[in-house]
Amino acid sequence: MNRIKNYKNQVLLAVCLIVIMICGLIISAVKTDNGNITVKEVVISPYGADLAMSMYMPDSALETDDSGNFVNADTYPAVIINSGYTENRACLDNVSIELARRGFVVAQFDMYGHGKSDTTATRGYGNVPDPFGDDMALLGAYDVLDYLRSLGFVDQTRIGMVGHSLGGSAVGAMAASTAGFYTLQDQLLNLLHDEFGLPISAEQVTAQDADSIANEKLDEKQRILYETRKAEITKEYGLGVRNVIVLDADVGFSAPKEVEVAGNPVWRDVQANFALFANISGGLSKGIKDKDYCLSSESVLGIMGLSTKAERNTWYSVQLSGTAVKEESTAVLDFYTSPSDETIQKLADSHSLRVLVQPKGWHAFTYISGETATAAVQFFTTTLTYDNGKLAVGVNAASAAPASTGSWKIKEAASGFAFIALLLMIMPLVNLLLDSRMFQSMHNTPSEPLHTKITPALVITTLITIFVPMFLYSKGVGWAMNVKASPLSTIQIATQTAFWAALMALMILALIVVKYYAYDKKRMGVCFREMYGLKISWKNIGKSIVLGLVIFAVIAVLLQCFYTCFHAANMKVTLLGKIMYAALADHQYYSYFLYALYFFPFYLINSMLVNSFRFKNMSEKKNMIIVGAVNCSGMLLLAVCQIIFGLYMKGSPLLPTVPGTSATIYNIPFFCLMLFVSTIFTRKLYVKTGSSIPGAILNVLVFTFPAVQSYAYFVL
């Protein structure tokens, strides 16, 4: 036992690394379905910039004959997975993993400017595109579709797409551009009208029978040309992305509208089977206080083809209009009806199915929503008629497997344990480094605790620091909206957050300076540098930087190995919002160090504050836990207000946000966890070094990783 005590740091470090490795193996096993699915990192560069994706492919899809031809050519349906703004591809692992286990080919990609994909500037977006005015599918979805077109085992007539948030806007754009608003008959009627000059009446548009008109009005030579053009149009029509899910986003370009068919104005819906998932507390809803708001909202009624209240989890069929006035959709069957049901399959073939699903939770809850994963499997199993093999329709409907999910939860748990192990290994590693010869000079005795009891000055200071995040949040993140993309501002959300952090640091610095000169200096007789742990030589500041960089290098290498060895694995927990450690892409290193500089003042001021709040009659451990709880309480309060009382209860933040900054809400849980853990790191280093500076440097280099991973739009 004594020997283990002597090697405590080595043992803890080894245990953490073993846990991380085991978690990686579990993640890999879940993603590959224990070796039945091939998962590959694929990078394409159609415009000179890398677009990164994870491809999930059933092993059977890759089987070839002796000539290298696919044995199962044109067999497997594919689904494109498009995560949203502030997200990388891992955020929709719940959907991707479950679809892959059903035998679908899944292309899960990072949009340009997100995760491992390069700059958006190559597609014309140096700054954040407008999700309501720009084509979001330009951020990679079209390029992924082109890549899928090159795969011989993919059934090109059965490609679907699902996207969350900004990715949902991309889905709407994809459906509008590839499926369009014209039926096949509409396009053939346009052919007769535009290329053959035939007049087409409104009644003929309603009848939707171009062949009968062609047979009656065209001569033999024209009919031959018509049949040739018809074959071309039919083939192109079959290549549309006609089975889509929008996750908690506006349907955008897919909204139904009036079009002209052969000169006749008619009302048309997008020609795709369409599911809208509107979270109860998401962006399209009003929270649990008004759960039914979404059922009658204009955007929902529009895409569902209704004029009155929609029903959840019900298949609707949109009706084809012969005039410029929309026809009312009709309710058909329960959404969870067997995917092989003959009635549903006929409607799926006509691309007229609609369904509204309302999973519980707020916008970011989608990442860990079992309801979302289950419903996505049900939708694509039904509309693409597939579940590890083409489904039999009609008499064999009962043979269709139920849409049960859950495997992805094991992966999420493993990611969470790896995340915890990563943080737990930091201090043992730091202790081992500090015990080495190079860092021996950093050891110093901290000043004695100054506080013997709770004083009014201490209470006032504590209360102000707790409420500073709430007081500065709305304006803090909003003022940075005017900062344009440049080498000094490479990530919009990180810039907004850094500006907010800088404002908090300035306010807290002003507070502690006033407190010191008004109270501490007179009552305690201690100098400012000693009270706040600023006594340190320049030599040891340099060593503190080296120490922090060594920790950074270890984390960066570990994350890269974790990503490479375990099928693009990452370390992630979702606490109201996600907190993720993932391998940095090459272009992210610049942003990492840039924002580490921006965040450093906040970490330094916070370390000073944390180390000054120590009581003489209390153990260091108890001191540390209490101060840690107080340190994160302001962010916890803000998170509860914005996410629980705001998003969850009423579907919008409790504290107003400046337009374009709402994504920063999901940074708040990260700040909350970070402030508690950083207190532990700060206090432990303070006990060893007698200074607040080493802890601040360590914290900024450890916690900048999540800040730059997926909160993107890189411009370098």
Image: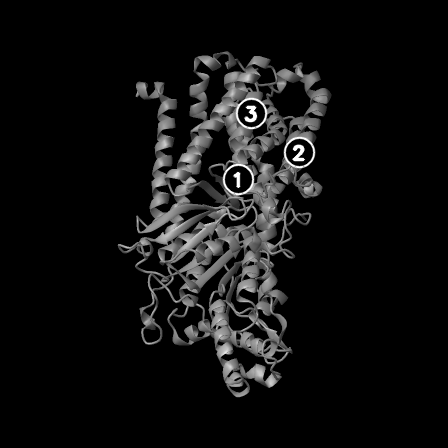
Q: Are marks 3 and 2 in contact (CB under 8 Å)?
A: no
Say which label, 3 or 2, has the lower sequence index.
2
Image mark for residue 134: none
Which residue has dot 2 on it? 504
Q: Nearer the viewer, mark 1 or mark 3?
A: 1
Which residue has dot 3 on it? 697
> Residue visible at 30% across and 48% down?
35
Residue extending furthest toward the left: 66
Q: Are marks 1 and 3 in contact (CB under 8 Å)?
A: no
**Is label 3 in a helix, a strand or a loop?**
helix
Mark 3 → mark 2, Cα distance in angstroms: 18 Å
Residue 119 falls in image quadrant? top right
For badge 3, the amino acid type reads Ile
Which residue has dot 1 on it? 709
Return the residue nearer the eye: 207 or 6: 207
For badge 2, the amino acid type reads Met
Residue 566 % position (x, y): 37, 41
**Is label 1 in a helix, a strand or a loop?**
helix
Label 3: few (<14), some (14–19) or many (≥20) C-alpha neighbours in 10 Å: many
Residue extending furthest toward the front: 221
Quadrant containing the N terminus in the rendered view: top left
Return the residue nearer the eye: 705 or 278: 705
Q: Nearer the viewer, mark 3 or mark 2?
A: 3
